[in-house]
Amino acid sequence: MRSWFKNITLSAALLAFIVVVLGAFVRLTDAGLGCPDWPGCYGLLTAPEVGSQTADIMHTESGVAKAWNEMIHRYVAGILGLLVLALTVIAVLNRRDPEQPVAVPVALLALVIFQALLGMWTVTMLLRPEIVTLHLLMGMATLAILWWLWFRTAGERSLLSYSDKSKSTGYWAFAALTLVYLQIALGGWVSTNYAALHCPDFPTCQEQWWPQTDFAGAFDLNHGDDSNFEGGKLTNTQGVTVHITHRIGALILLVFFSIMVWIAQIKNDHRFKQASRAIAFLLLIQIGLGISNVLFLLPLPVAVAHNGVAALLLIASVYLNHVANPRKLN
């Protein structure tokens, strides 16, 4: 059973990455409401056909394309849910094995169920930014936990016997993971509020180094109505504020990882050094993609890649914590 658990964990971890990228593609193609109901699509198990009619809606080619984007994302997410369910069943059945993690798979299943509810609320609550952002964050959390589970149960098991890791290394690794996750949250808030192009230039924003801002309005979760949020509802000043905050977050990450890479060079820990360098390299790519999004007005391949590299940064940060905190999985 242990080999089954390892193989399914890896499959689920890889599939979770695909789900995250597909979710980004759905958001960036404005397909979040491509299917206005859940879990079906206009009452069907698949997207409707072009030219067909549901109630008073005639389905056009562009509308059907968006519906398929949404449904494919749901199908793949559903398969991921089944894999997590399989992990949980195996863990419970094999719970007498002292090396079999049980609590983590059970918690992961609960997280996936909550994630499915968020997916439903994303549609039924008409793309409320706080719901869509939370949906993204829980998806990223699912991705992180699956990869952490894989690293702990199958990857480099000799690490688990190490006991001489310095506490400072663990602190740096945890701080790295926290900062990356917070930056992903900011990026999600930019995306769900359609603020990516509120600053169409770089390094300035609307040709100003520090334009007018409204932090209270930009991060206000009380929108006060239940209307459709597709296209965003922030004012120009609020959108600029969200965008600038995300840029500041990227700068903080750049400074932090520059220091961490320098510290890693003086520590006698080859894997920690490698992981730190990998994160720094991914961060440079991510910053380049972010700048390209601005200068080239959010081209779809670049924007999707920006989300994908964010997921890779998170996975690399999880691995960093794995090598910095070599404890046995409970």
Image (cartoon, helix red, strand yellow):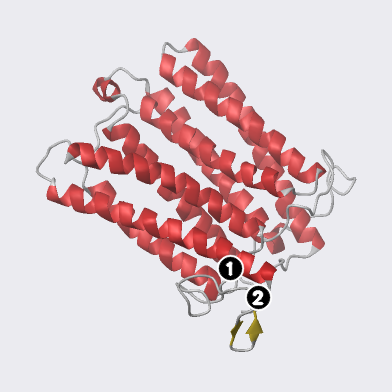
In the image, farthest residue toward the right:
207
| Label 2, residues with CA under 10 Å away: few <14, some 14-19, many ≥20 | some
Q: Which residue type carries mark 2?
A: Asn
- Closer to the eye: label 2 or 1: 1
Name the spot of residue 125 as percent of width and height, x first. Answer: 55, 74
Q: Secondary structure at mark 2?
A: loop
Residue 252, by quadrant, is: top right
Q: Is residue 169 above or below residue 134?
A: above
Report the quarter where the N terminus lies: top left
Name the spot of residue 153 as percent of width and height, x first. Answer: 27, 34
Q: Is residue 225 above or below residue 261?
A: below
Q: Is residue 85 above or below residue 160?
A: below
The answer to whether marks 2 and 1 mark residues whose Cβ atoms lie closer than 8 Å is: no
**Residue 67 numbered tag:** 1
- Asked if one can make out residue 316 in the rendered structure from this viewpoint, the answer is yes
The one of 12 and 257 positioned closer to us in this rendering: 12
Q: Residue at x 74, y 44 (%)?
A: 293
Quick check: 301 left or right of 133? right
